[in-house]
Every structure is written in C-alpha cells, then in structure tokens.
Amino acid sequence: MKKFIPILTLIAALSLATVAAYYSVFGISKLFSSQAKAVILMAGILEVSKLITASYLERFWKKINFLRKFYLTLALIILMFITSLGIYGFLVSAYQETAYKVQEVEKKVMVQETKKKRYQEQLVSITTEKESLNKNITELTTGLANNKIQRKDRNGNIINTTSGSTRRALEKQLDNSMSRRDTLSKKEQVLSDSISSIDLKILDLETNSDVAAEIGPLKYVAKITGRDTDKVVNWFILLFIFVFDPLAVILLISANKVLLDRKKTNIYGEPKVLVEGGKVESKAERVKAPTPPPSPSISDEKQKEKQNLLREIKKIQESGAAHVAKGRALTELRQRLSSLEDDNIKTY
C-alpha cells in the first residue's frame, strides 16, 4: 500500500485541480461573457501553468535564486486566488438561479397568505355576528317563555294570559335571527374550507417544489443560526473555496516530494549514493553485491611455471644423478618448457 500512496496523492491532486479549473474557468468566463472563448483559453492556460509552477518550485527550490523564488511564489498565490475567485463566481451564479426560483415560490406563497388573511378577517366578523345572534335568540326565547300578563276577573281571581301581539313580534324576530344565523353558518363553513384549501396550497408550494429540496438544509441552518439564507449560502461557498484549489496545490507539492524521495531511497528507505560509472546504488545494494577480487592474468601464471621449470633443469644439471636418468629428466623438462613457450607465442 505504501508504494501506491504517491500515485494516489498525485491522482487526487490532479483530479481536484481539474475540477477546480473547470469551475474557475467557466466562473471567470461569466464575468467577461462578451469574450467568453478567449477568457476560457486564457484561464485554462493559467491553470496548467499554476500546476507546473508548483511542481517546479518543489523540485528546484534549492537551485533557483531568491528573485525567481519570490516571483514564482507570488504568481502561484495570485493564481490560486484567481482560481478561488472564479469558483466563487461560478457557485454564486448557480445559486442565483435557485434564488430566483425561491423568490417566485415566496411570491406565490405571499399571494395565498394575503387571500387567507382576507378570509380570516371575514371569518372573524361572521363569528362575532353569530355570537351576537345567538345571544339575541336566547333572549327572544326567554321573552316568549315569559310572555305572560296577569289580570283579575270580576270575582277578583288572578288570571294569567299571553299577549298575542307581543308573541307574534317575538316569534318574528326569533325567526329572522335564526335564519340569519343559518346563513352566517353556511358562510362560515365556506370561509373555513377556503382557508384550509389555501393552507394546503402553501404547504405544497413550500415542500413539493424542486427548490425546497435544493435549499431545504440551508434554510434549516439559517433558521437555527438566526441568519439570512443568502448569508448562510455565502459562508458555505467561502468555506468551499478555501479548501478546494489550495488543497489541490498542496497535494500536488506533496506528491512531487514523495516521488523525489522515492528516487533517492531504495525499497528499505535507505539513501542511494553515486558509485563508479554514474550508477546510483544504496548502501544495502553495495553490501549485498561485494566486488569480486581481480582474477590473475594468464600470462603471469605461465611465466611462473616457466621459471619453475628452469629451476628444476638447473637442479638436475647440478645433481649427481645417473647420466641416463638425468638425460631423460632433462629431455622431459625441456619438452614442457618448449610447449609452454609455444603457448605463449600463440596467446600473444
């Protein structure tokens, strides 16, 4: 797994940088829409140059002079800022399209809220009038029940009677009040149904639209923080761009550093050194493969053998051995010496 870390780091850095460049290039092009193609070309080349600059600074930091370091570092920071600005413009532009849809939904909700408020006012008026009618009906009913007149007859007895005219007047008022109450009850029911229907429409607008799903979490964050939705979106975009392009550049620099370190060390993490012939080897590799001792030269061996033969010939000549044995030994040694000299002539 350790072998793949540099490759994975490099892939992550290039992926982040590519996506950041895409957002940045199109974000900047929207700021200069009259020359969008030219701006896209310019911004794209700057994005590639930024990555090359970051790699160059990491690899040759110790070899370049101060002025070049200062300018390239400053250029890298400015390019990162431009990329972040382009991403910010792209995301803000994308949010504006959603914001317009939100405003449209809010206006529709406002219209429904206005209608609901008007119906509620009418409902309050009807309710108040109904309460007054109910009170009058109660009083009229009581009046009809108490419509009694007491008088005495000729004999002085008390007689309870009712007034026909009063009763008719009370009954007429009671019928009118009850009829009015029934009419108001029907209006009250209609208004209540209308208010319920408006509530359902508002709920549908606020929950079943595509916009509600898009900014629902942001609205929740805005609600619990007590901030406006636009401010919450702005905070989110700023946090997003702070870790986007800078992370891509840092990962690219890290990948370069790891790859450079891998070239300077072996699989055991030991540093490599320059050996004879320009080859780079590690200490472990040099110990593992020791240099073999130089093999002796063939001509040197034959020379030593020739000298030994000459010494033996001299010893035999100076010895007191029998003439026949001495002659046979000398003949054999001289033949060996002759064959040895013939081999030397062939070798050279």
Image: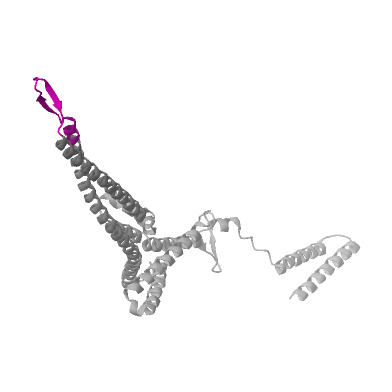
186 or 83, which lies in front? 186
Placement of 334 over or under 251, stated as above or below = below
| Picture quarter with the C terminus | bottom right
Residue 335 spot, x, y in % from top left: 84, 69
- In the picture provided, is 225 more to the left or to the right than 345? left
Say which residue appears at 20% left-offset and 34% top-offset.
Answer: 141
274 or 70, which lies in front? 70
- In the picture provided, is 152 more to the left or to the right than 338? left
Per the rendered image, the range of residues in magenta is: 139-163
Location of residue 160 by image quarter: top left
Residue 164, can we see it?
yes
Residue 60, can we see it?
no
User: Does residue 146 belong to the magenta stretch?
Assistant: yes
Say which residue appears at 19% left-offset and 30% top-offset.
Answer: 145
User: Does residue 109 belong to the magenta stretch?
Assistant: no
Residue 197 spot, x, y in % from top left: 33, 51
Placement of 314 over or under 37, stated as above or below = above
Location of residue 334 by image quarter: bottom right
316 or 264, which lies in front? 264
Say which residue appears at 40% left-offset and 75% top-offset.
Answer: 45
Q: Give the residue furthest to the right.
A: 324
Colour scheme of the rendered structure: one colour
Say which residue appears at 18% left-offset and 32% top-offset.
Answer: 142
Residue 107 spot, x, y in % from top left: 28, 60
Residue 316 spot, x, y in % from top left: 82, 62
Count the numbered circles shown.
0
142 or 257, which lies in front? 142
